[in-house]
């Protein structure tokens, strides 16, 4: 089974998502801004979220971490390396902060740094990639600041709020991560 250690930063720590996080994760799905920024158009039941949390807790092709303030186990959001391709040493990345009260405090950027460090140094990944919607300039800025390189634009990939939106494809290689 894939080792998923607790990762500790200055303001936050990351711990593996467990079935106990299902309630908080389900509640976060009601945050309109988070749903918009991630382009989430699906609706989920609590039972679906519980099953998801159970599955990812034991998965060997992904690491799903809850973002928590130091000294507090409350779920503030998540940071994930998924679709890990062990043969090619690559993975996809995604993150979400659960509510507006937890945004703009540096939690997301610190969580991203922790998971990238873990992905490159512990999992020995060579490439981590992501897609971010053009209507999320805050995320684009953070990813560029952390060294992600724009590779292209996926045109009209999302139909949301009665219009089409582009996504930017970005990646970061191990030798670019310092």
Image (cartoon, helix red, strand yellow):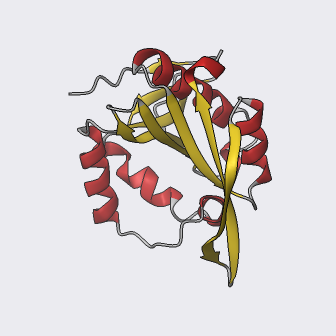
Q: Quadrant of the N terminus?
A: top left
Above or below: residue 65 compared with residue 155: above
Residues 56 and 90: in front is 90
User: What residue is drawn where x is 25% and y is 47%?
Assistant: 54
- Front residue of 53/84: it is 84
The quarter of the picture where the C terminus appears is top right
The reply to whether residue 174 is visible in this rendering is yes
Instruction: Give the image location of residue 157, x and y in percent.
Output: 60, 69
Q: Nearer the viewer, residue 68 or 121?
A: 121
Residue 36 location, x and y as percent?
65, 65
- Residue 28 percent coordinates (x, y): 52, 57
Q: Which image quadrant is residue 177 in? A: top right
Q: Residue at x 39, y 54 (%)?
A: 23
The residue lying at 25 percent from left, 56 percent from top is 51
Relative side of 23 to 54, left or right: right
Please, is residue 111 above or below residue 46 in the view? above
């Amino acid at each position: 089974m894939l080792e998923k250690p607790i990762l500790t930063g200055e303001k936050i720590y990351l711990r593996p998502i467990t079935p106990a996080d299902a309630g908080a994760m389900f509640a976060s799905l009601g945050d309109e801004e988070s749903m918009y920024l991630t382009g989430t158009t699906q609706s989920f039941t609590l039972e679906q979220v519980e099953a998801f949390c159970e599955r990812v807790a034991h998965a060997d092709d992904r690491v799903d971490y809850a973002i928590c303030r130091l000294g507090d186990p409350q779920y503030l959001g998540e940071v994930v390396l998924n679709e890990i391709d062990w043969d090619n040493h690559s993975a996809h990345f995604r993150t979400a902060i659960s509510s507006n009260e937890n945004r703009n405090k540096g939690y997301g950027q610190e969580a991203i740094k922790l998971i990238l460090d873990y992905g490159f140094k512990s999992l020995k990944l060579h490439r981590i990639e992501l897609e971010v919607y053009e209507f999320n300039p805050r995320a684009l800025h953070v990813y560029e600041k952390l060294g992600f390189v724009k590779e292209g634009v996926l045109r009209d990939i999302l139909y949301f709020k009665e219009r089409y939106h582009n996504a930017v494809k970005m990646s970061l290689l191990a030798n670019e991560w310092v």
